[in-house]
Image (tube, grey):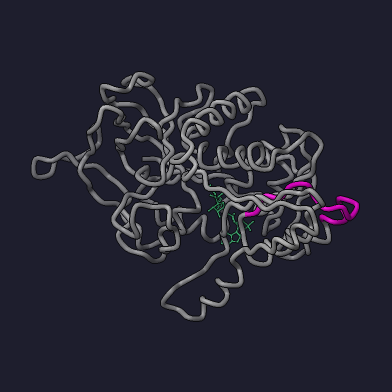
């Protein structure tokens, strides 16, 4: 236990989002240590916490799936050790290593939360790898298997493929027997993608990915696209989707909206993905979208089943998350800057 006792109350370190702004608004605060308050809760001593792009959007005031605009602890995923369980918890015991997946609260030494957001740690993974797993791999697996319903031999284009979600998607797609093309914005990322096993790596900052994809697929287009960038990337993606192809939309990483700066209003409007159903009908294509955090709330039993299936899958194919850097919790601002400036490849996590 690393918390301090202040005014008789045990406190712990946490990244509390107090202010919307650039990465330097992020600071470590002392907050009261939580405790188990219902029979279904579990108190966990978090050791590592994965950083997701959604937290960067939350810090900029652009993410709506958080409890409030400010005044909450950031961090959507983590791994740690169970310290205490409520009387209704039978699946976990004190001392168990676990994964936490929830919309907030994980950039902290302790979290107490409902058992539905807690999963057993994957035994063959380190705690770091467990902390880097749920946000990216569960999203990637749902996108490929549940939403796009991929089949062996199909082609996929993964946009922003060197990011955390992108890398997870590439690794899973290869193991699922797909032919994989991936885009990224720098030569270093292109080298990284080749090492991850992509069949075609495209630097979309200086090459028209649409032309390359059409050529790669003999002008048929790809069967599946994972899209998380928005704007031109989304619009050009639609141009290289095959008949009966499925585009799965999960994010909008290029959004730069600031409601106090009118210069950002029109660019933001232009980059929001839109659908013309009549075009889809004419081309026989599908656009799908989902949010893994929302699914945990609405479809808990199904997501738990999918998680177990995914754990079996990564065990069978010996797939592990690629962790590029581990920042100490105190360097949260530097970690956000590193991701936001598009330097990161794979996952970035915090050591708590
Ligand atoms: N719907 C869901 O359930 C769900 C779950 C997880 C993630 N997501 C979404 O998926 C996306 C990826 O998340 P992640 O955690 O994997 O993030 P990440 O590791 O930071 O990857 C994001 C990537 O987006 C690319 N990008 C393109 N334009 C950008 C811009 N203007 N600013 C910053 N990055 C830009 C960058 O790659 P290049 O430099 O190579 O372009 C970057 O590596 C995010 O939009 C996130 O919100 C959605």
Name which residue lies at 45% across and 62% down: 62
**For this view, does 217 lie left or right of residue 271?**
right
Quadrant for residue 25, please give it: bottom left
**For this view, does 352 lie left or right of residue 314?**
left
Name which residue lies at 38% across and 20% down: 91
Quadrant for residue 71, please give it: bottom left
**For this view, does 100 lie left or right of residue 124?**
left
Taking the image as four quarters, which one is ligand 1 found in? bottom right
Tell which of 318 and 326 is nearer to you: 318
**Outermost residue to the right:** 218
Tell which of 83 and 226 is nearer to you: 226
Q: Residue 261 magenta-drawn?
A: no
Above/below status of 46 relative to 69: above
**Outermost residue to the left:** 7
How far from the left and from the top, in percent, is residue 43? 29, 31
Q: Residue 217 magenta-drawn?
A: yes
> What range is drawn magenta here?
213-227
Name which residue lies at 51% across and 43% down: 292
Image quadrant containing the C terminus: top left
Tell which of 39 and 170 is nearer to you: 39
Name which residue lies at 34% across and 44% down: 105
């Amino acid at each position: 236990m690393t918390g301090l006792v202040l005014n008789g109350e045990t406190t712990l370190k946490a990244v509390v989002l107090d202010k919307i702004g650039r990465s330097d608004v992020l600071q470590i605060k002392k907050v009261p240590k939580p405790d188990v308050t219902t029979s279904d809760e579990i108190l966990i001593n978090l050791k590592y916490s994965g950083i997701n792009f959604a937290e960067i959007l939350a810090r900029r005031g652009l993410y709506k799936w958080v409890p409030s605009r400010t005044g909450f602890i950031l961090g959507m995923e983590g791994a740690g050790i169970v310290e205490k369980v409520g009387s209704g918890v039978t699946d976990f015991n004190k001392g168990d290593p676990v994964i936490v997946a929830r919309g907030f609260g994980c950039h902290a030494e302790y979290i107490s939360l409902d058992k539905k957001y807690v999963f057993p740690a994957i035994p063959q993974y380190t705690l770091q790898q467990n902390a880097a797993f749920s946000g990216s791999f569960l999203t990637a697996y749902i996108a490929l298997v549940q939403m796009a319903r991929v089949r062996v031999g199909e082609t996929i284009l993964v946009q922003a493929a060197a990011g955390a979600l992108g890398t997870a998607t590439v690794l899973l797609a290869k193991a699922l027997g797909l032919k994989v093309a991936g885009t990224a914005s720098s030569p270093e990322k292109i080298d990284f993608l080749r090492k991850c096993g992509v069949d075609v790596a495209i630097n979309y900052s200086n090459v028209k990915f649409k032309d390359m994809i059409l050529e790669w697929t003999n002008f048929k287009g790809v069967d599946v696209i994972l899209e998380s960038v928005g704007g031109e990337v989304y619009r050009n993606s639609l141009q290289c989707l095959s008949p009966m192809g499925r585009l799965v939309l999960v994010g909008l990483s290029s959004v730069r909206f600031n409601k106090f700066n009118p210069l950002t209003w029109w660019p933001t409007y232009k980059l929001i993905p839109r659908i013309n159903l009549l075009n889809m009908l004419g081309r026989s294509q599908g656009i799908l979208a989902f949010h893994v955090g929302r699914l945990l709330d609405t479809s808990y039993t199904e997501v738990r089943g999918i998680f177990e299936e995914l754990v079996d899958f990564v065990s069978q194919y010996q797939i592990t998350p690629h962790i590029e850097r581990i920042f100490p919790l105190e360097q949260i601002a530097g970690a956000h800057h590193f991701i936001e400036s598009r330097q990161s490849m794979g996952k970035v996590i915090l050591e708590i």
